[in-house]
Amino acid sequence: MHSGNKHATIKANIRSGDFVELMEKLKILADSAKYDVSCSSSGSNRKNTKGGIGNGNMAGICHSWADDGRCISLLKVLFSNACTYDCAYCVNRITNDIPRASFTPEELCELTIQFYRRNYIEGLFLSSAVMKSPDYTMERMIKALKMLRAQYRFNGYIHFKAIPGADQKLIDEAGLYADRMSINIELPSKQSLKLLAPQKQPEKIITPMSYISGRIQENKEQRKIMRSTPSFVPAGQSTQMIIGATRDHDASILHLSEQLYQRYSLKRVYYSAYVPVNQHPNLPAVYTTPPLLREHRIYQADWLLRFYGFKAKELLDEQQLDFNMDVDPKCDWALRHLDQFPVEINRAPYEMLLRIPGVGVHSALKIVKARRIASLSYEHLKQFRVVLKRAKYFITCQGKYFGSAPFESNTIRQYLVEKKNDSPYVQMSFL
């Protein structure tokens, strides 16, 4: 369907409220939701062209990814941006003079279903500012979820952002209708919350996060016994931290993430570079643009924690509290531990292969499998998609060293920095 007909078609199906007012609400609440990155977005801005089909920048549509790699289009909106809190970093804070709007449960359901029926979206990411109280907000959001699941029989993906401080019974109820839930930590320390969001309390974030984790595990055990047991948050939970709004070091952020993964089995911790949308004496005055490279480094380190066997204390410690902006965290770790290199590709254990800069999980598995058959040469590594412009400084292959610099930390670092890609930051590297 052409985008010119899109609003007209939806308009014909809206049964409650004024269409123009509803579209204005959608615009306001989709714009207010863009700072929450606890679901992934493609960043697409492709518009429809004459004779084309679809519109990649329709208000509120973002993209997330399933465990099997499928891209899922989501309607990403706030239920309301009429917040009673005054968090210094947030665009929706009560003292900001911005357009305010709130959906009714019926309006949100109708929009979601109309978008879904026309194949614009596959699911919903629903968050909200705190209206009146956490309980009141959750009750309104849950009413919309129940209508979608029961009345509209909507079986699409729903990511629900719970409100810290809401009653545990409401968390329980929401978990029966949502696929994934998130409770955003926002700031990485008690001191940071007290400084910028004094109305929020750390225990009101951690307690429901712990409860959701326990309920998910309990539900899995119950379903082993009785398959008809209703699922509880089957896609797990996630959270988000803002990077750069406070003086917290990268070490504190990474150690907190490690604890969250270990204690609460989170699917993801998302990191959001602080966007300077407000002026406040407690906010940093140094950023003219978001610290995207710092966010990028923390995402790279997060990947090392989850898939490469690293510990937070290995990547950062008291001697180095923040990541190096010149090289990625794995390279930086390797340069600080040259006593463990170079490693021989044909003999190194799988766990050590993962620590070689430029070697990813799939590459390491291919190396282990292939070298059982025959000794691997340097040329073989190119076939395994090893990033040799980094890896060559840390390996030997059949006893030969292929690095173009003397085996010394500062010299190798200089070569890595000089030969890095100077293209603008787009997406994190997971190698």
Image (cartoon, rainbow, N blue to C red):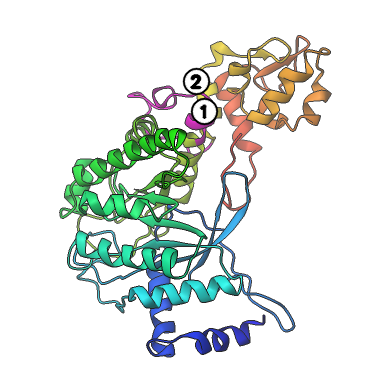
How far across and how far down the image is residue 217, in percent?
Answer: 38, 35
Q: Which residue is mark 1?
A: 332
Relative to residue 337, is residue 52 depicted above or below? below
Quick check: 394 left or right of 251? Answer: right
Q: How many marks?
A: 2
How far across and how far down the image is residue 250, in percent?
Answer: 37, 37
Marks 2 and 1: in contact by CB < 8 Å?
yes
Question: Of residues 18 and 374, which is closer to you in this image?
Answer: 18
Q: Which residue is mark 2?
A: 336
Question: Of residues 273 and 255, which is closer to you in this image?
Answer: 255
Quick check: 421 left or right of 337? Answer: right
Magenta stretch, residue numbers: 303-326
Q: Is residue 31 magenta?
A: no
Question: Of residues 401 and 377, which is closer to you in this image?
Answer: 377
How far across and how far down the image is residue 347, in percent?
Answer: 70, 9
Quarter-wise, where is residue 34 in the image? bottom left
Looking at the image, can residue 217 be seen? yes
Instruction: Identify which residue is drawn at 59% across, 71% down.
Output: 120
Quarter-wise, where is residue 87 in the image? bottom left
> Which SS class for mark 2?
helix
Magenta: main secondary structure equals loop
Q: Amino acid at mark 1?
A: Asp
Q: Quadrant of the C terminus?
A: top right
**Label 1 Cα crowd, 10 Å radius (few <14 / some 14-19 / many 20+):** some
How far across and how far down the image is residue 314, in percent?
Answer: 43, 22
Q: Amino acid at mark 2?
A: Arg
